Image (spheres, rainbow, N blue to C red):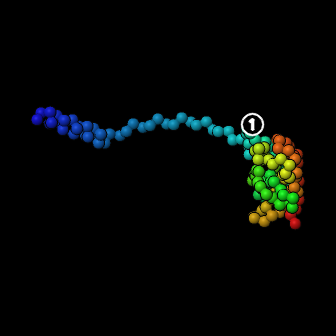
Amino acid sequence: MHHRALVVLCLAGLLAACGSDRPKPEAPAPAPVAKAVKKPVDEPGPLPAYQRELSGTLLEIPAGAEVELALLVIDERGRPQRLLASSDLTGTGQALPYHLRFNPEAFPAGARVELRGRASRSGQLILHLPPQRIAQAQTQATGALRFEKAP
């Protein structure tokens, strides 16, 4: 019986120690976190080896306008058939740099591929980019592209 009494006494002591009202020691203050340096939106980082990129500058985009760029496969009637890449930007009122990355393996040989774009404000089309023919699946700069007023 003495062993049982000793076991019960130890368990009671253990429960009492765990249930004490003693304040817990304060956790050490977290170390100051180094601020992450944000990359500007116009710099997407290094280009992976399996991708290619179209880049350039969009001119005369009003501040706040929503810009959509798309690299599309176009059929013989001028209709889009497949999306190869797309990008959404917001106008700043100044020249707007863009980077549009795509997989060159998805670029169909011998097909017509175009860069198309449109800008809208409050859901209404205000500008469009005349189609820019892209002949090869390689990294290239289109230079400055000017949007035109939408009809």
Q: Which residue is mark 1?
A: 49
Q: Quadrant of residue 126?
A: bottom right
Name the amino acid type tagged 1. Ala
Whether 99 is drawn above or below 14: the answer is below
Q: Residues within 10 Å of mark 1 (few under 14, many from 20)?
A: few
Q: Quadrant of residue 10?
A: top left
Instruction: Please give left or right for residue 65 compared with residue 12 in the image.
Output: right
Which residue is found at the position 78% from the left and 43% from the top? 104
Counting from the top left corner in percent of width and height, residue 145 is at: 88, 51
Counting from the top left corner in percent of width and height, residue 110 is at: 86, 49
Could you tell me if residue 16 is visible in this image? yes
Towards the viewer: 147 or 70: 70
Q: How many marks?
A: 1
Instruction: Please give left or right for residue 151 compared with residue 47 in the image.
Output: right
Which residue is found at the position 42% from the left and 37% from the top? 26
Towards the viewer: 139 or 74: 74
For this orientation, the residue located farthest to the left is 1
Counting from the top left corner in percent of width and height, residue 9 is at: 18, 37
Which residue is found at the position 76% from the left and 57% from the top? 66
Counting from the top left corner in percent of width and height, residue 129 is at: 86, 56
